[in-house]
């Protein structure tokens, strides 16, 4: 890892298999309910092209203005790993890299997210960690709701 970057980690366990977690992350209809969604905002756009070289673009309309999150998928290995570049429009520094590893854990799974960011953004490290924690917790709530929905 170059000295000009820092890495932060966030983990979450789920009661569903890795493939369910992986697929939810890449499904725009599900992702719009947790991916970069804030409690006081509303995701108005969730474009996800789930292929290597494909892009994602998420817009959360917040009271303070629209927040843009975008990236390019660099690696997709269903159901265990995805890697993507990551930037927000106002800070398009193209240095960020996010790795998501999903491992089986009993009947469920554990997601570990690693965000490598430019050292110049070190002052935002804790805010970024909290943001990712909110995302993976939101994914957990979404997965729980999906499990509770009646089937056919």
Image: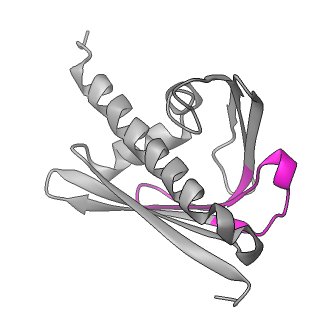
**Would you say residue 55 is visible in this rendering?**
no
Residue drawn 74% across the image and 54% down it: 72
Residue drawn 71% across the image and 77% down it: 119
Residue drawn 38% across the image and 45% down it: 21
Residue drawn 33% across the image and 52% down it: 18
Q: Which residues are magenta?
A: 71-97
Q: Is residue 97 above or below residue 68?
A: below
Indicate the quadrant containing the N terminus: top left, top right, bottom left or bottom right: bottom right
**Would you say residue 1 is visible in this rendering?**
yes
| Residue at the outermost top position | 152
Position of 133 with respect to 18 (left or right) is right
User: Which quarter of the figure has residue 92?
Assistant: bottom right
**x then y, percent, for residue 93:** 84, 63
| Residue at the outermost left position | 106
Q: Is residue 68 magenta?
A: no
Position of 144 with respect to 66 (left or right) is left
Colour scheme of this structure image? one colour
Q: In the depicted view, which residue is nearer to us: 130 or 52?
A: 130
**x then y, percent, for residue 107:** 15, 50
Position of 21 with respect to 43 (left or right) is left
Q: Is residue 149 above or below residue 130?
A: above
Q: Is residue 76 magenta?
A: yes
**x then y, percent, for residue 137:** 38, 42
Position of 29 with respect to 80 (left or right) is right
Q: In the depicted view, which residue is nearer to us: 117 or 62?
A: 62
């Amino acid at each position: 890892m170059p000295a000009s970057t820092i890495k932060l980690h966030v983990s979450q366990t789920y009661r569903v298999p890795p493939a369910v977690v992986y697929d939810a992350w890449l499904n725009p209809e599900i992702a719009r309910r947790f991916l970069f969604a804030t409690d006081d905002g509303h995701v108005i756009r969730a474009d996800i092209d789930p292929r290597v070289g494909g892009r994602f673009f998420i817009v959360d309309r917040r009271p303070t203005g629209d927040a843009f999150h975008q990236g390019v998928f660099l690696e997709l290995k269903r159901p265990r790993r995805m890697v993507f570049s990551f930037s927000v429009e106002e800070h398009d520094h193209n240095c960020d890299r996010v790795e998501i590893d999903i491992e089986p854990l009993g009947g469920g799974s554990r997601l570990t997210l690693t965000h490598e960011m430019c050292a110049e953004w070190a002052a935002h490290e804790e805010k970024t960690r909290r943001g990712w924690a909110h995302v993976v917790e939101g994914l957990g709530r979404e997965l729980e709701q999906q499990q509770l929905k009646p089937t056919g």
